[in-house]
Image (cartoon, helix red, strand yellow):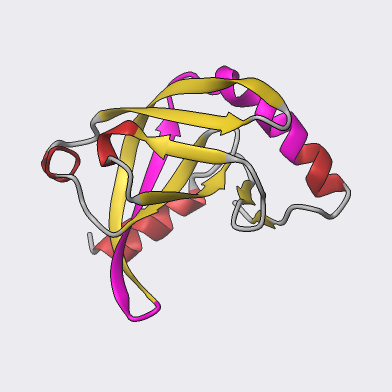
Amino acid sequence: MKIASAVDFLHNLRRYDRFCLTDIKGLKGRMNELGRKHSLISLSRGGCGFFSRTQNEVVATTANPIVNCEFKWSRFHSKPVNILGRLVYCVPKESNGKKVFYFGIEFLQPELILPLILKLEDLAARGKVSTFVR
């Protein structure tokens, strides 16, 4: 299966809409295995997505590794939220003429992200956050 068709297949399996986080101030996320050079792009009840300029060797060579994600949004939630997830895919992409990698993660403990998701759903209902279709 080609990478593009595999990613399309995975997108069709999504159960939840994703929130686009490029315009959300103060909401930070990280995948500890990637170090510091990555950006949280999307978040849903079931998982999240990161862009990174580098591809971690362990993440790149291990099939569906378990990763630790951390989310902070001090404006609405006082404590960081730590969630284990499974890396479902890592896809190379081009952004502004540079190669980047998109990491798609499925949460193993989705109930832990619920307080942040409820706030994002409220903001989306008021037109302050956009969503991606599943």
108 versus 87 height, above or below? above
Q: In this view, does 125 lie to the left or right of 88?
A: right
78 versus 25 height, above or below? above
View extreme (bottom): residue: 97
Q: How many labels does the image show?
A: 0
Name the residue located 66 percent from the left edge and 57 percent from the top edge: 23
Name the residue located 39 percent from the left edge and 46 percent from the top edge: 104
Percent x, y of residue 131 = 68, 54
Q: In this view, does 120 lie to the left or right of 81?
A: right
Percent x, y of residue 73 = 63, 33
Q: What segment carries the magenta color?
A: 96-120
Percent x, y of residue 61 = 11, 42
Q: Is residue 57 left or right of residue 19?
A: left
Percent x, y of residue 55 = 21, 52
View extreme (right): residue: 126
15 versus 79 height, above or below? below
Instruction: Name the residue nearer the viewer: 16 or 39.
Output: 39
Q: Does the magenta stretch include residue 41?
A: no
Name the residue located 81 percent from the left edge and 44 percent from the top edge: 123
Instruction: Name the residue nearer the viewer: 127 or 11.
Output: 127
42 versus 5 height, above or below? above
Q: Is residue 102 magenta?
A: yes
Give the quarter of the image for residue 97.
bottom left
Please state, as top left, top right, bottom left or bottom right, where the N terminus lies in the image. bottom left
Instruction: Name the residue nearer the viewer: 109 or 51.
Output: 51
